[in-house]
């Protein structure tokens, strides 16, 4: 399995936050179906959902000064995978309430889902400037740094560690920290992150893939700097 395949496989393993899940969760909280609606047939549900989405978009376009309307319209566009239109409405919501972190985080998530990683990075940084103790947003920032065309493993690892300072049991951060350290050649650090993850949740579905990646990296030739770091780490542990 290639590095990118491992990374993308981890996205859905024990970490639903990524690929916009946090935005979906927010959206669902704003649009909980009634028990009667939940009992409808799938086709009826689909038709109803489409009608509601169309109405939400219409309200947003007709009421450009209504913050909630912009957020609901963005949710509808996001559900339809129309990310550019969702971003447009979220930008308007951000203009209406510039001190509200909700549209800022949503802008980051939607851009990440659209694979606009530089834009996502910008919005995550902005969100963390407003709410620095948000472990989910910080872990998401680390994730887009891993997904960038030129991954920044060192900075990503630093963001995951900061998220863990806020929430030491934050499993997503431990998962991606282990991956980032394995990729950067820090085998010992990667194994320590996996050990912490296993202690928190022995059944975490990402564990086998992380172990496979660490073993694969350990078998592959390492840059001199990585070999030196691992040697120093082992010597330090021996002392």
Image (cartoon, helix red, strand yellow):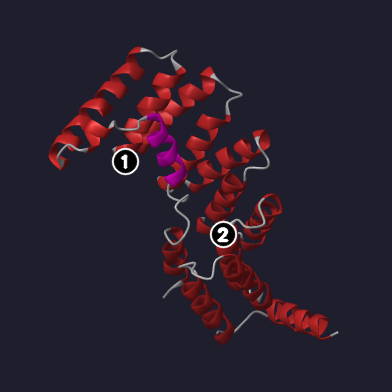
For the N terminus, the quadrant is bottom left
Which element type, helix, strand or loop, lies under badge 1? loop
For the C terminus, the quadrant is bottom right
Q: Residue furthest front?
A: 35
Of 6 and 56, which appears nearest the observer? Answer: 56
Label 2 and label 1: CA atoms lie apart by 28 Å
In magenta, the rendered stretch is 20-30
Residue labelled with disc 1: 81
Which element type, helix, strand or loop, lies under badge 2? helix
Tell me the crowding category of disc 2: few under 14, some 14 to 19, or many 20 or more residues within 10 angstroms, Cα based. many
Estimate the x, y position of residue 143 in percent, counting from the top left. Answer: 54, 55
Tell me the crowding category of disc 1: few under 14, some 14 to 19, or many 20 or more residues within 10 angstroms, Cα based. some
Q: Residue at x 49, y 69 (%)?
A: 203
37 relative position to 85: left or right: left
Q: Which mark is residue 187?
A: none
225 relative position to 12: left or right: right
Of 220 and 149, which appears nearest the observer? Answer: 220
In the rendered structure, are the residues bearing label 2 and label 1 in contact, judged by CB atoms less than 8 Å apart?
no
Q: Residue 35 appears in which quarter of the rendering?
A: top left
Q: Residue at x 38, y 32 (%)?
A: 86
Estimate the x, y position of residue 29 in percent, counting from the top left. Answer: 41, 34
Count the labels in the image.
2
Res 59 visible:
yes
Q: Is residue 154 magenta?
A: no
Above or below for 92 versus 26:
above
Along the polypeptide, which appears first: circle 2 or circle 1?
1
Q: Residue at x 76, y 79 (%)?
A: 233
Above or below for 48 versus 110:
above
Residue labelled with disc 2: 171
């Amino acid at each position: 399995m290639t590095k990118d395949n491992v990374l993308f496989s981890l996205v859905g393993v024990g970490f639903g936050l990524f690929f916009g899940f946090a935005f979906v969760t927010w959206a669902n909280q704003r649009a909980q179906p009634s028990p009667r609606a939940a009992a409808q047939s799938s086709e009826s549900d689909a038709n109803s959902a489409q009608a509601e989405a169309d109405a939400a978009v219409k309200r947003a376009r007709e009421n450009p000064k209504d913050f909630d309307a912009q957020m609901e319209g963005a949710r509808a566009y996001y559900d339809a995978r129309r990310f550019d239109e969702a971003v447009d409405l979220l930008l308007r919501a951000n203009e209406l309430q510039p001190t509200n972190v909700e549209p800022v985080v949503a802008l980051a998530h939607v851009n990440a889902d659209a694979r606009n990683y530089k834009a996502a990075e910008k919005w995550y940084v902005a969100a963390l400037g407003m709410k620095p103790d948000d472990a989910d947003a910080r872990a998401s920032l680390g994730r887009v740094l891993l997904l960038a065309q030129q991954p920044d493993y060192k900075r990503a690892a630093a963001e995951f560690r900061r998220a863990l300072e806020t929430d030491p049991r934050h499993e997503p951060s431990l998962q991606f920290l282990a991956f980032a350290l394995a990729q950067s050649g820090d085998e010992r650090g990667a194994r320590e992150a996996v050990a912490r993850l296993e202690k928190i949740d022995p059944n975490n579905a990402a564990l086998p893939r992380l172990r496979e990646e660490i073993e694969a990296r350990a078998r592959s030739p390492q840059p001199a700097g990585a070999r030196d770091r691992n040697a120093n780490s082992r010597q330090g542990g021996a002392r």
